[in-house]
Image (cartoon, coloured by chain):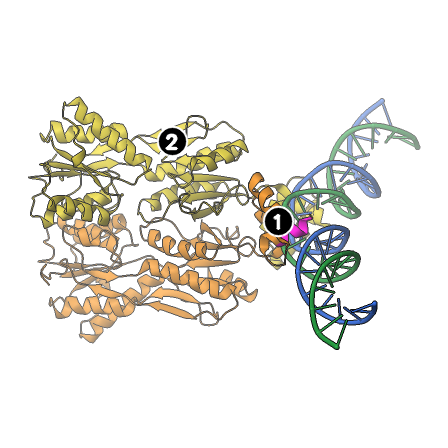
Chain colours: A yellow, B orange, C green, D blue
Amino acid sequence: MSVATVSRYINRNAPVSPEVAERISKVMAELNYVPHAAARHLATRKTRSIGLLLTTINYDFFTPLLSGLERIVAENHHNLLVATYRADLRKDYPPPVGPHNTDGVVVFADALQEEQLAQWYRMNFPMVLVHRTPPPYLNVPYVTIENKAASRKIVDHLIEVHGRRRIVFTRGLENHEDSHWRELGYKASLEAHGIPYDPRLIIRGEFDREVTYQEMSAFLANNHPDFDAVFASDDDSALGVIRALHDADIPVPEAVSVVGFDDQHFSCILPLPLTTVRAPTEEVGRMAGLQMFKLLQGEPADPMTLLPTEIVIRQSCGCSESQ
Amino acid sequence: MSVATVSRYINRNAPVSPEVAERISKVMAELNYVPHAAARHLATRKTRSIGLLLTTINYDFFTPLLSGLERIVAENHHNLLVATYRADLRKDYPPPVGPHNTDGVVVFADALQEEQLAQWYRMNFPMVLVHRTPPPYLNVPYVTIENKAASRKIVDHLIEVHGRRRIVFTRGLENHEDSHWRELGYKASLEAHGIPYDPRLIIRGEFDREVTYQEMSAFLANNHPDFDAVFASDDDSALGVIRALHDADIPVPEAVSVVGFDDQHFSCILPLPLTTVRAPTEEVGRMAGLQMFKLLQGEPADPMTLLPTEIVIRQSCGCSESQ
DNA sequence: TGTAATAATGTAACCGGTTACTGTAACCGG
DNA sequence: CCGGTTACAGTAACCGGTTACATTATTACA
């Protein structure tokens, strides 16, 4: 019984006689033998694992993303390497996942800079981008959600249904594409309704409850321009907004409508259930996984997977519960 | 310039002359060379990665756990393999992470069964358990939180401050130790106050908002015994409880006090801010990582890391806001 | 019965690093 | 000037699998 035969038995890629198979199977069970992954990787040049590169793991947002991706990865009998990397901070270090230890990586937002993407692209390393559009010269499949149209619709709602015209926008993270598109949707809606864009109504938020709370409080403290609504770039920052308004004794939604984005786990159970946009984050994870395995199997992946979003009208905009 | 010299340069484990170092460094930068992980793993018998074995990735709970662990892992220049495994469902398959592809694994709750733990223990494979106590004959370090004392305290609060005596407990997942300890705390409090334990007041919850909602609704529908409070095994199920009570027009907290456990992200911003127990989940992740690296460095790890919890009094128990 | 095809297994090179061992040259103290 | 370190670099075995190729046994068929 040679190592070759055992290998063939394990991989089922060549005939092995029943008696030998039986013997191998017994011995394996007895020794609790599991093939050493590194040796296989080295020999086959496949790691059977894929990487997920995140910027941080701060947001509840990541649970569904990870969950969706992990399911697909597991179904394909691969492993998932989760790592964080901020390209802007660690130019000296190579990314923790890449061609050296995975068969492909899923890159979230701006975890990698374009230069690195381009380099991996040139060497044909499988990549899928999530919540990020690749530069036009890089044909890398990406999975993201419809940000702009939904943002426009929710701002339309504020304007058309609630007659708001002075709408604050709390920006998400710099360099974060979602934030960018949401702002464009916001602007498109204003423009469509002939409302001038007022940069004084744009404040920082960074997709963070605390940061947004601070910024919103500062905004309220320094004789601010009039406003009658806030479009927060995500639900978490909407909470910061609401708290700041509450502190300032500004009634929500009577004086100021507040809407968010994402429809996070908590958004439907708030004191004032949040009007927001439902983002199918788990589906983003699943889709990214599916595209990745298409690439790994040599099939053509979809260049773009744009998942639909829908606005969810609750009460924080001023609509009544019965609606 | 031989491969050996390059290896020594990269690992800085033997002197290399400045000129040669310079040359190697240049060539490496030019080729964007990153050593192939599998080859190193094979040669060194170290994978430089650790595994995290979860049961599912359903709960927001996992974001802080993952975040804390990932930070420590990254600081130690290791990789993190995240996998799900339900020992009870997949007896035929070996766990997706283990000695074959990691240097150690962090095991959440009952992701692995005792037999597997014992086997790895015998081969001296580094493990750290989180939210689970190892069986007494297995000297595996574990990190968990104080469940029982805090549960007892929060039930004490219901009894002593609010005069509740008929307290429903919504169980968490079967086999999940946290649930078990929380129930023991509940019983201890009842006993200390001379309140008889009534099994009819124990209902299923599974740490899940929806399941708890269904179960609580069923409880309310079938001429149930009197009750005046609910201790939900986690905050998510507390939401299910509150919704069911709301559906049945039972005023919370006037007629029924509701308390939870975990102090999740959303708990402080609910319509009725939740009285609960703060669980330092991110710290659990960090500690598990620290213990793991102690093991990997051959230092003795702390057999038990019991992180303190504290009760957070808000309004769902009936306390007033000003408190 | 002889020969070719097929099934089952063994042999050994190879994947890309690490490292024990060896060799050479420079350096040092007496 | 010599024996002994020390600094540096090369050679080759090795890690644990996979797989091309070789070998032997078995079956099929003319």
Q: What residue is shown with label 2?
A: A133
Question: In the picture, which quadrant includes the C terminus of chain B?
Answer: bottom left
Q: Secondary structure at mark 1?
A: helix
Q: Residue B180 is drawn in which quadrant?
A: bottom left
Residue at figure coordinates x 27%, y 70% from the top left? B149
Please indicate, yes or no, whether residue A16 appears anywhere in the rendered image. Answer: yes
Q: What residue is shown with label 1?
A: B39
Residue at figure coordinates x 44%, y 69% from the top left? B135
Q: Which residues are magenta?
A: B2-8
Question: How far across and down, in percent of the image, does residue B102 sit?
Answer: 53, 55
Q: Amino acid at mark 1?
A: Ala
Residue at figure coordinates x 19%, y 50% from the top left? B217
Q: Amino acid at mark 2?
A: Thr
| Residue B7 painted magenta | yes
Q: Chain of mark 1?
A: B
| Residue B194 painted magenta | no
Q: Chain of mark 2?
A: A
Please indicate, yes or no, whether residue B221 appears anywhere in the rendered image. Answer: no
Q: Residue A175 is drawn in which quadrant?
A: top left
Q: In the visual, does C3 lie left or right of B168?
A: right
Q: Nearer the viewer, residue B31 or B91?
A: B31
* Distance between the alpha carbons at the discs numbered 2 and 1: 34 Å
**Location of residue B186 with respect to A1 vertically, above or below:** below
Q: In the visual, does B314 lie left or right of B76?
A: left
Question: How far across and down, in percent of the image, does residue B33 sit?
Answer: 57, 43
Q: Nearer the viewer, residue B142 or B18?
A: B18
Q: How many marks?
A: 2
Residue A195 numbered mark, or none: none
Do residues under tags 2 and 1 come within 8 Å of each other at their CB atoms?
no
Q: Are marks 2 and 1 on the same chain?
A: no
